[in-house]
Amino acid sequence: MLTPQELADELRVSVRTLRGWRDRGRGPRATRIEGAIRYRRSDVDRWLAEQNPPEEHPPERPAP
């Protein structure tokens, strides 16, 4: 589990930016544990993958 500060440091954004994303439903899924916001690594990794989907390569053409 990551704290907002740990995740902000990793993503190189401010904690305030994370809060804004969370409020607008744009960032990685957050969880409250005894009132404290935490981020699961799996949720962060999934969100990052969604932000940068793998490039699609056009199908190769057969040689003439």
Image: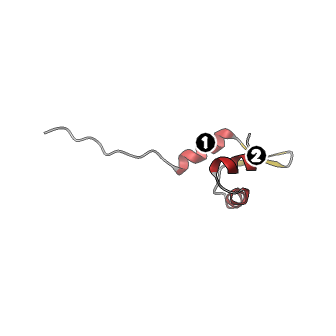
> For mark 1, what is the residue?
45
Q: Position of residue 58 (x, y in %)?
A: 31, 46
Q: Quadrant of residue 57?
A: top left
Q: Position of residue 17 (x, y in %)?
A: 68, 59
Report the label total: 2
- Check residue 7 in the rendering and tell me which mark sits there, or answer none: none
Q: Amino acid at mark 1?
A: Asp
Q: Can residue 29 be seen?
A: no
> For mark 2, what is the residue?
3
Left or right relative to 60: residue 12: right
Q: Is residue 43 above or below residue 19?
A: above
Please give the name of the residue rendered at 38% of the width and 46% of the height, measured from the top-left corner.
56
Please give the name of the residue rendered at 64% of the width and 44% of the height, measured from the top-left corner.
44
Q: Amino acid at mark 2?
A: Thr
Q: Position of residue 59 (x, y in %)?
A: 29, 42
Q: Quadrant of residue 46?
A: top right
Which is nearer the N-term, disc 2 or disc 1?
2
Q: Secondary structure at mark 2?
A: loop
Residue most extreme to the right: 34
| Label 2 to label 1: alpha-carbon separation | 15 Å
Residue most extreme to the left: 64
Q: Can residue 47 be seen?
A: yes
Q: Nearer the viewer, residue 3 or 12?
A: 12
Badge 2 crowding class, 10 Å Cα cut-off, few under 14, some 14 to 19, many 20 or more, is some
Please give the name of the residue rendered at 70% of the width and 61% of the height, measured from the top-left corner.
20
Q: Nearer the viewer, residue 13 or 57?
A: 13
Q: Secondary structure at mark 1?
A: helix
